[in-house]
Image: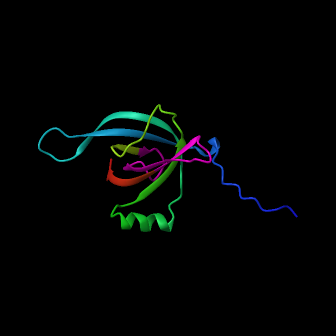
Amino acid sequence: MRPFKYQPPRASVGELRTPVTFYEYIPTSGPEPGETEKTVLFSTWAKIDHVWLKDLEQAKANKTLSDLTITIRNPQGQYIPTNDHYISVQAPGYENFRYNVEHVQTDFPISQFMTIVGRLESWA
């Protein structure tokens, strides 16, 4: 019998099927509150993780509408996501939502990928 050896789940480029765009917003000029789209910072393909019950509980704990976890290829310094950036997902069910980048983490066993957690801030 072969001994058990744990192997971490591997992401592959074939799973990156959803286009996402990272934006930067600026406050609107004038007396009305709100923000307007300033520039497109980076566009890439991503893997959108399914929403689990733990994600909904985490969103409730953070007092946000919803959280989203995406995996992208590591841009290798070409683009570094920060909390000031927003994510737009071009997929059915996500078109009218803008997610704020909440947490960025590089997958260390597989440094080719980056995991980003976004929280729903507003509708487009």
Q: Residue at x 50, y 49 (%)?
A: 70
Q: Residue at x 40, y 60 (%)?
A: 66
**Residue 86 rendering spot, x and y as whole percentages:** 37, 44
Whether 46 is drawn above or below 40: the answer is below
Residue extent of the magenta highlight: 88-116
**Residue furthest out toward the left:** 31
Q: Residue at x 66, y 54 (%)?
A: 8
105 relative to 3 in the view: left or right: left
Q: Nearer the viewer, residue 96 or 56?
A: 56
**Residue 83 rendering spot, x and y as whole percentages:** 35, 46
Q: How is the image coloured?
A: rainbow
73 relative to 102 in the view: left or right: right
Whether 71 is drawn above or below 50: the answer is above
**Residue 124 rendering spot, x and y as whole percentages:** 33, 47
96 relative to 108 in the view: left or right: left
73 relative to 2 in the view: left or right: left
- Which quadrant: the N terminus? bottom right
Q: Is residue 112 magenta?
A: yes
Whether 73 is drawn above or below 103: the answer is above
**Residue 111 rendering spot, x and y as whole percentages:** 58, 42
**Residue furthest out toward the top:** 78
Q: Residue at x 33, y 43 (%)?
A: 84
